[in-house]
Amino acid sequence: MKMVFISKIKWIALFVLMLSMVSLVVHLSITRLSGAYSMQSTLMPFNGFDFTASIFAPQSDRFVRNMKLWGPVMSLKSLQPYANPRSNYPAERNNGYIYAKIFGGFEKIRSSICDLVTISRLLNATLVIPEIQESLQSKGISYKFKSFSYLFDEDQFIASLKNDVNIVKSLPENLKAARRRNEVRTYKPKRSASPNFYVKEILPVLKKSKVIGLVLHDGGCLQSILPPSMSEFQRLRCRVAFHALKFRREIQMVGQLMVQRLRASGQPFLAFHPGLVRNILAYHGCAELFQDVHAELIQYRRAQMIKQGILNGELGVDSHIHRDNGSCPLMPEEVGLLLQTMGYPNRTVIYVAGSETFGGQRVLIPLRAMFSNTVDRTRVCTKQELSDLVGPETPLPLNPFQPPPTKSEEQLKEEWNMAGPRPRPLPPPPDRPIYQHEKEGWYGWITESDTEPDPSPVDLRMQAHRLLWDALDYIVSVEADAFFPGFHNDGSGWPDFSSLVMGQRLYESASSITYRPDRRVLAELFNITRDNMYYHLNYSWKLSVREHLNKCLSEDGLIRQSLLSKPTTFLSHPLPECSCRIPSAEVPKQVKGNDGRLLDGGEDECPTWMKHSQEDAHLESAVAEDGSNGNNELEYENDGVEQQESDDNAVKSRLTQLPVDQDDEWDPND
């Protein structure tokens, strides 16, 4: 009897062991399949439209658009683009030719060209297609392109402005010869030069010599805010920026293809521009937000700016104070928390724009952890598509950094014999090999020299390529269903990428979701919960964030944009000159600043051919409101049980004292 019992126990144990083995094999198979799928979605390059199946939600998943997150903003739907001339706009006689050289990156180029056309119109001069110094063939770009045609369509630019300004591709031969002999007067106007400067100082010289040159460094050559009598010149700026200044055909095709791929899953996407640029970080003293070599690199550039007179300030500043003042960019992890608080689910497609993100992919890791579908142009385009944009280029040396020559045995023996008295210490171990990736870019020189070297041929070519990558990101950011800037309204006076994107989105589709956050308010909010950012965000804090971000989507955000961005770059806020309003039931109240300038309202009434019937407007409004109310269950997906009243009273009191908008900067009753 005992033997039979032991035998049964053995069979049961054997059966349990077999079940365990089968279960282990099944789990390993599932893990292997899911791991391969994860690696494929993370590392495989894009190959056609199948790319969306790996990084986005499956096509079978039904996506319901949440109107609270993806718009439109109903209070801004009456704004329509209208940059047509409002009065007779005759062209007068030609006073001469203007040629220009433009220095700087994408934002400065775009802003400078619009100002150049406006100045040419003001002086009744013929504009020669400007030279973009970042994209000259001396920088190693393809022989297929001239400097302007590397980015923009020359023929489209000339044809679109033929009723406004005469534009030619080159100077006449006699004036070319005078330019080669340095007989042409050249000016370096300030970014905020007034129209009187051109009329009184430059126009007489232009009439006499028939040609002048302009050299532009700061992203413009004309003050942003012009007198009301010059509103036609403001509208000309809009026609240049939003209609005439089109990218060349190849860039437009790839940009639109990127938008199609980002929407291929059937859901909308959000574009995010971090704004982490070394020059901006150095100008505003944000070095302490980074660590290790990055802080040292920012401080080195800040010292250069002080030495060159670009910046009047001290080298050593408290970056945390500057961040609290709203001078520094939002870090990507902070933006991720804001988007989560607004209710964007972790499957939201986020496109990271910007050819330069200081700190590299390391600073984007927290954002990618919160939103798994965070991509950039390298994930949406193939290498072949990007290389086709660049065109055929002359190959550069793969390794421009040559190691020091090796010493022969005779030289080593001679050095040993010539060494100091014995006993001698053992010779030091051989140096660690220096790899190419350590010598290129920012990291190569900072440990070896106190002076940053001049750009190498590789650096110059990469700077030219960045113009193309910024152009692609600009197309995607303008077309995105929502846009969030990590940095804008910087106050330095330079045009920035995010502000230009926000201005064009405001012009083309004012009601689209475009966040215009006040970084000073957000810094105070983050200071309240900085120790618990990744653990527990209380409900009162979330309400304050939502209240501020929702306000910045509508008129409050427009007023702040007009106060801070428009004095720097008109294209960042082309209202009211370049828009009109369709009559609606609710007429917006005009808001003026302390200088009497209209900050909100004041747009002309749209012409008859643009007007919608009141019935259609009411119908659209009713449908939109019904849609938004029907999706309330999706409005804030991350609330959960956190709505219980367990918040700290001290935290509540601090939250209620935070300023949502800057009332001290404008007076609604003026």
Image (cartoon, rainbow, N blue to C red):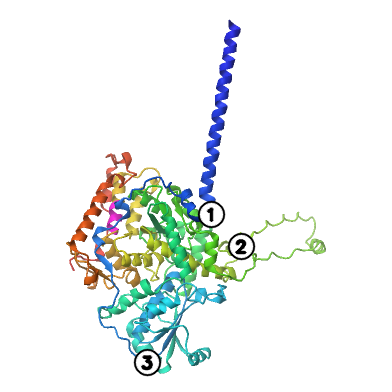
Q: Secondary structure at mark 1?
A: loop
Name which of mark 1 and mark 2 comes first in the sequence.
1
| Rendered-image quadrant of the C terminus | bottom left
Seen as rendered, the residue at the extreme top is 1
Give the CA separation, mark 3 to mark 1.
58 Å
**Numbered tag placed on residue 45 in the rendering:** 1
Q: Main secondary structure of the magenta part?
A: helix
Q: Which residue is mark 2?
A: 439
**In the image, which residues are magenta?**
546-552
Q: What is the number of callouts on the image?
A: 3
Disc 3 crowd, CA 10 A, few/some/many (<14, 14-19, 20+): some
Could you tell me the amino acid type at mark 2?
Answer: Lys
Image position of 534 with respect to 48: above or below: above
Q: Residues within 10 Å of mark 1 (few under 14, many from 20)?
A: some
Residue 563, position as x, y percentages in the image: 29, 68
Residue under the image location 26 percent in, 71 percent down: 576
CA gap between label 3 and label 2 equals 52 Å
Q: Compared to 290, does 80 lie above or below?
A: below
